[in-house]
Amino acid sequence: MKNLEGVTKPDQYRALGLSTFAFTVCFAVWTIFSIIGVKIKQDLGLSETQFGLLVATPVLTGSISRIFLGIWTEQFGGRRVFSILMLITAACVYLLSFANSYALFLLAALGVGLAGGSFIVGIAYTSYWFEKERQGTALGIFGAGNVGAAVTNFGAPFLLVALGWQQTAIVYATILAIVAVAFFLLSKEDPMTAARRREGGEGSSAMMQLEPLKYVQVWRFALYYFFVFGAFVALASYLPRYYVGAYGVSIAVAGTLAALYSMPASVFRALGGWLSDKFGARAVMYWTFIASLACLFFLSYPDTQYTVQGKDGPIAFSFALPLWAAVTFTVILGFFMSLGKAAVYKHIPVYYPEHVGSVGGLVGMIGGLGGFVLPIVFGAVLDMTGVWTSSYMVLFLLVAVSLIWMHGAIRRMERRKVPELGGEAFRYLPEIQDLPHAQRPTDPAGGAAQARGPAKAHGDPNSERA
C-alpha cells in the first residue's frame, strides 16, 4: 500500500524501528552518570555541589541543544543529523575514560548531554514518515525509547562491577558508535528531505524555522511538557530520596519503588500516542491533567494531627498517607504523565508540519529544563517548609495552572470560531467533532479538530499571539 507519495509501510516501519532503537541507546547513554557518577565522585573526592553539577550537566545540555538540533534536522535531514550526533556523543563518552580532572569531566558531560538532544531529531525524522492520523501512535512508540534509562539502571551496575567505570564508558561509547554507523547505512532519507533535494531546494533558514516561536500557543505546549516530561525526570531522581526521608525505607527499597514509577512513565507513551490518534490530543491532555491533579492532591497532603472537642473531651486523630498508597498514586501519576508526553507531541506535526524540528525542539528544551530546575525547587521548598510532601504541592500548582490555561484557551477559541457554542451549549464541547466540517474550528490545543486535519499549518496562532 502506497502513501506519502510512494512511501511504503515497510519504509515507515523501518524508519520507526531504527529511530526508536537509536533513541533507546541514546537515552541509556544520557543517564550513564546515574550509575558511574557515584564511583567517579568517590575516586575524585568531589563535594556534593560538584557532584550535583556533574550529574546535572548532561540534563542541561541535552535540553538546551534540542532547539538547535531541531532546526538542523529540518535543514539537513534527520538521517544525517542523527548519525553525526551519535558519533560525536560516542567520542565524548569515550573521553570520559581518559578524564583525570574535574574540568575534563564537565567537558565530557557537556558532550554526553547531546544524547538527550537526540529526542527531537528522532521526533522530526519519524513524523515525516507517517500520515497525520498515525503520527500520534508512531511518535508514542518512538518516545517509549525513554526506557533506555531502565536499561542503564539494570545493566550498567553489572558492567561497573566487572569492568570499572572507565571500561563501562568505553563499552557505552563503542555501542553508540556502532549504532550510529548502522543507522546511517540502514535508514533512508525522510520523504520531506528527499523531495526537497530532488527539487534542488534548500532547507529553511534558521530564522524562518524560529518564526513560529513568537506564538504563545507554542509556549503553552512547552508548559505542558515541562510537567509531563520535566517532572518525570525530576521525580525519577527525587523519589528515592523522598521514600528514604519520608518513610525511612532502605535505599535499595526506595530505588525499587522509584522504578515502579519510572516504568509506566516510559513504556505507556506508545499507548498515549494511539489514544491521541483515536480520541484527540486535547482529550488525552484533559485526562492527564485531571488525573494528575487528583493524584497530586493526595500525595501533597502532609502527615497531619487533628484534635476535635468531643462531648467527653478532646478527641485526637491523624491522617498520613501510607507507603503503599503513596507508591500506588505515583504509579498512576506516571501512567498519565506517559500518556501526556505523547499527546503533547501529537499537536506539533499537525499544527506546525513544516516546523516540527524548531517547535518540537523548543518544547523539548523547556521540558528537559524541568528535569534540571524542578529537583532544585523541590530541595529549596523542602528546606523552607520542612514538609516532605511539599514537592508534590509544587507539581499540583504547576498542573493546575496548565489545566486552567489550556481550558481557557480552548474556550476562547471555540466561542470566537463558533459563537453559538456560548452558554450551556459549551458544556458539550467534546461533541464539537460532530459539527459539519465547515463549522469545525481549527483547534490550537489539539483534540477533535486535529483528528481530521487542521485548516492551515499553524492552526490559529493569531488567537494567542504574544
Image: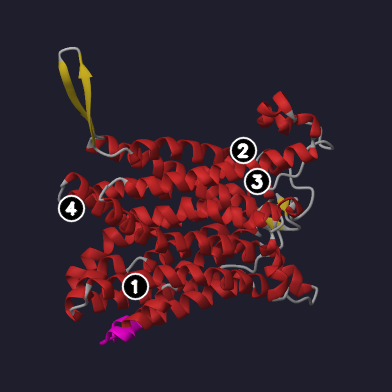
Q: N-terminal of the two: label 4 or label 2?
A: 4
* Percent of width and height locating residue 352: 70, 57
Characterize the local packing of mark 1: few (<14), some (14-19) or many (20 or more) Cα atoms within 10 angstroms.
many
Range of magenta residues = 94-104
Residue at the location (50% across, 76% down)? 85
Q: State if disc 2 and disc 3 touch (CB < 8 Å).
A: no
The reply to whether discs 1 and 2 touch (Cβ–Cβ < 8 Å) is: no
Confirm whether residue 144 shows in the render. no
Q: Label 4's element?
A: helix
Tell me the quarter of the image containing the C terminus.
Answer: bottom right
N-terminal of the pair, mark 1 or mark 3, is 1
- Tell whether 230 sits left or right of 428: left
Q: In the rendered image, which quarter is residue 442 located in? A: top right
Mark nearer the viewer, 3 or 4: 3
For discs 4 and 2, the disc positioned in front in the rendered view? 4
**Label 4 to label 2: alpha-carbon separation:** 40 Å
